[in-house]
Image (cartoon, coloured by chain):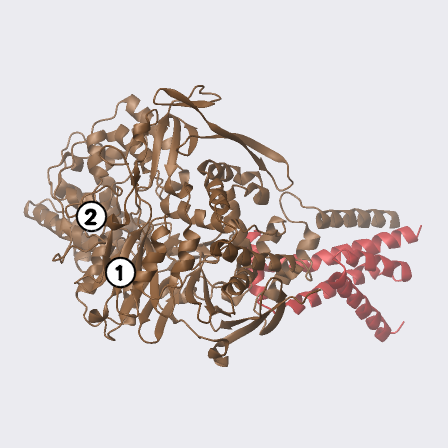
Chain colours: A red, B brown
Amino acid sequence: MTTASRVAKFAMIVGAMAAGTWFVGWWTVPVIAAVWAIVDRTDRTLPLRAAGAGIAAWGLLLAAQLPGGSLERLAIAVGTAMGVGALPLVVLTLLYPALLAASAAGLVRALAAR
Amino acid sequence: MRLLNGAIAGIALAGALAVGFFSVRGAPALGSFLDPAHGVWSVARTAELPREQAVALGGLGAEVEVRYDDRGVPHIFGRTDLDVYRALGWVHARDRLFQMELTQRAVAGTLSELAGARVLEVDRTARRQGLALAADAKWKALSADSPTRQAVEAYMGGVNAYVRAMRPEDVPVEYRLLGRTPREFDPRDTYYLLARMALTLAWQDDELQRGAIEAVIGPEAAAALFPVDAPIQEPIEPVPGRASARYAPGAIPAPRVPDPTAVADARAWRGLLDPSARDADGMLRTRGEGVVGSNNWAVGPARSASGHALLSGDPHLQLSLPSIWYEAHLVVPGVLDVYGVTLPLGPITPIGFNRDVAWTATNTGADVMDFYRETVDDSLAPTRYRVDGAWRPLESRVEVYRDPSGRVIATDTLHRTHRGPMSRSAVGFVSTRWTALELSDEGDAFRRASRAASAAEWYAAMEAYRAPAQNFLVADRGGHIGIRSTGRYPLRPGDGRGDRIFDGSSSASDWTGDWPLARYPQAVDPAQGFLASANQQPIDPSVRPGYLGWNWPAPWRAMRINSILRGERGMTPDKMRLAHTDPRSELVSALLPALANAVGVAKTAGRLDAETAEAHAFLEAWDQRFDVGSKGAVLFDAFNSALVRGTWDELVLPGEDRRVATPNSMLLVRLLGDSGSVWWDRRATPAEREDRDAILVASLREGWQSARARWGNDPTAWQWGLVRRANVRHLLFLPGFGREGLPVQSGPGTLSPSEASGTHGASWRFVVELGPEIRAWGTYPGGQSGNPASTRYDDRLTQWQRGELAPLRTPAAADGLPDSLTSARLTLRPESPR
């Protein structure tokens, strides 16, 4: 597989995760990662790439909020209220889909290999 | 290895899904919370108003145009008042939905259903107060064709239309943090809002505090320290020919030394009081002293530079984000054209102006609440109470409290006598009668007053207004100014006083009627050419006796306003604005000469140490202004605190370090006239007999030492703005949602009074000039939006801190607001028939 096709596939997965979250809900992230793992059983780095796709997908969706208002103001307010701070809240928001996607892909890979 | 990886992945996925779907330890379920499309982040998408928007709104008779100006104020133009009220409901809901929910639940006593068992006691208190039942009764009393009922139903129709059409990104962030969703409102909830106003402004359980004070120092001393009539008279109703405050002479009897029984009594009484009634030092708070201090004043044409009447409003309340107020302008050509601050949850404009009249209010603080000690048939489960020797049945009901899941977390059986709610206390069963719990229709009064064409018409519309009693100040375009302390004032038997707990077993204790309107404190177009109020005793009892209340706030602010107005023949809107944050205090003027005299006496007698001399020199160099950068203000405040502590030590219970109450600063000034009073003597130094001068000098030394310990040894580095700061907290006290530590120009006794917590202050400042074309300026501490991601959440705070005002836009038609001043356009269209 060429680098270009790898990138295209990654972008497609990112797009699917973003669209799934937007139109259906957050839980589509692990579902899409799992489907990806079923389809692409040969890729040993898939959990890692699924995590990257999750981060990218939610990162894009976060960026989509920027034109409406101040994401920074919101991060400071909510992060402080939750006692974690603004930056950790943003990091958590990006790591959470990564965890969902990586663990779903890893589980499917392990099950498929049996 | 693969098996191990699979197991780890499975566990990780299960954990991530679990915290994604389910709430853990009160934290929201992470999946829906962090979801950037529908979760908390999506709130940012709707933070700013869309430039253009059209929405179908059921129930409208015709299209309504809303133009948001450059300050985010909606100007709502419709063909009927009901359409405009419906639109206001929609607009309020968009900007302040969570605030509305919190207001309603606070009165209903259902906060636990939103926030869980941690707020159960708040709910219990609310239900014991009985305001929700009273609001329900007021709503039920409105006939179906009542214009007020129709207005409120239209308003709540707008609110509920917004709630029903909400998208995930419209759900306020507070709901997300609590893991809850918005629900629809009931029209009667507007009367819950009015009840909330009454609770904030007219709940006065001073009689209970009086019980604790009497137990500690004896009834005679208590009566002198917490008197019915203020020792310094600067009344709201002007006294013809009087150009300064009247200092009434009076002695303060010696306190008694409390015995163990008295101490136990004091503690029992104190236990009855709401813990929130304590000040920052943990002492019970004396009403109106330094905490909340509203002001209003108006000048007639003879005293204004333009020859038009000018009116200024400066109501002080608890500071919050979002702000208690929401600015709005409602226009129905030929019917209604009212601009002012509204309260989310109702279609009323308590403070504002139309094209002809402007109005504002300060709290009257009249005694409109009495307590009755009841005799019941069974102290554990009472069913009857005795009046005039006969048993009467108690009205009882079971109150059920639920948590957010609907689970019952507590039940209470509450009782009522014919007087009002009855509760069990450490001193027996006590029932409460309160004007706010009885039938009245403030909503209708405000609705009609907003249409008045003159001051006289405004007052006529407000005749039915009952609670909370307010000093309503009005000015009109005809050049008339007027003030009336409007509300229901009960007539009591005997000496007419209500500053004690009554014997409930006799019907002779009950109210016998109400003050007639003609007896209310009031004045119209006085010869002095101005009117002002600042929560002080409204009528000088030496001119017109009559019991209206007791324990009145000190008139320092009133004296300062009147001093400014008396000296001004060319008042302008900007001078009115400057007065809002005027940095001078009449309290300083009353205390410092006595201190200078005491220091002089000590110096002459060779008893003045170098440290105290240095402190006094520092204080003498102070310009007596409470500016943010002031250094002398820091020392004055520390001196004043030490003086209060040293003087009123007799009010501290043995073994404690807090007073049961702090007398008003007027009493301290009165005591200055008696240099040898036993009150000056410190109980902690039985071998010495201190007098006034000794305490004054010692207080200066202690203040100097405490200021240096707290703010540094170099007094030139002190800053008053570091001592007194405003803390504008979020309604749920969420850190990150409030703005705290804001330096403000305020001080004890100034027009903008302050206290250590910094949680109260000017909630809305405005000035109106009533010329041929009305002109107005205003601001409040916060912003129009309740969304913390919005720039309009707190965009006025800096302006408010600086004491500046913004020009208020008053377009008469939708196209009257220029594009350059229009931030957003909203068209609300009637829903097409299906």
Mark 2 residue element: helix
The relative height of residue A74 versus residue B663 in the rendered view (above or below) is below
Seen from this angle, which residue lies furthest bottom?
B819
At 54% from the left edge and 39% from the top edge, which residue is drawn?
B118
Question: Which residue, as the protein is rendered here, is positioned at the far right?
Answer: A114
Residue B558 appears in the rendering: yes
Q: Residue at x 63, y 49 (%)?
A: B179
The mark lying in front, picked from 2 and 1, is 1
Q: Which numbered dot is residue B751?
A: none
Q: Where does residue B698 sit, x and y in percent of width and height?
A: 18, 43
Q: Amino acid at mark 2?
A: Leu
Chain letter, disc 1 residue? B
Q: Nearer the viewer, residue B415 or B720?
A: B415
Identify residue for label 2.
Answer: B700
Whether residue B11 is situated above or below residue B829 in the rendered picture: above
Per the image, label 1 sits on a secondary structure element best described as strand
Q: Are marks 2 and 1 on the same chain?
A: yes
Could you tell me how far apart the alpha carbons at marks 2 and 1 are, in whole angstroms? 43 Å
Is residue B752 visible in the rendered image? The answer is no
Upstream in the sequence, badge 2 or badge 1? 1
User: Taking B124 as reference, is B215 above or below it?
Assistant: above
Q: Position of residue B357 (x, y in %)?
A: 34, 66
Residue at x-position 32% and y-position 32%: B510
**Crowding at label 1, few (<14), some or many (≥20) Cα neighbours within 10 Å?**
many
Q: Nearer the viewer, residue B217 or B18?
A: B217
Name which residue type carries label 1. Gly
> Horizontal and vertical percent for residue B14?
78, 47
Please give left or right for residue B30 compared with residue B193 in the image: right
Q: Mark 1 and mark 2 in contact (Cβ < 8 Å)?
A: no
Provide residue B479's location: percent of width, then percent of height: 26, 69
Q: Which residue is mark 1?
A: B482
Residue B157, quarter of picture: bottom right
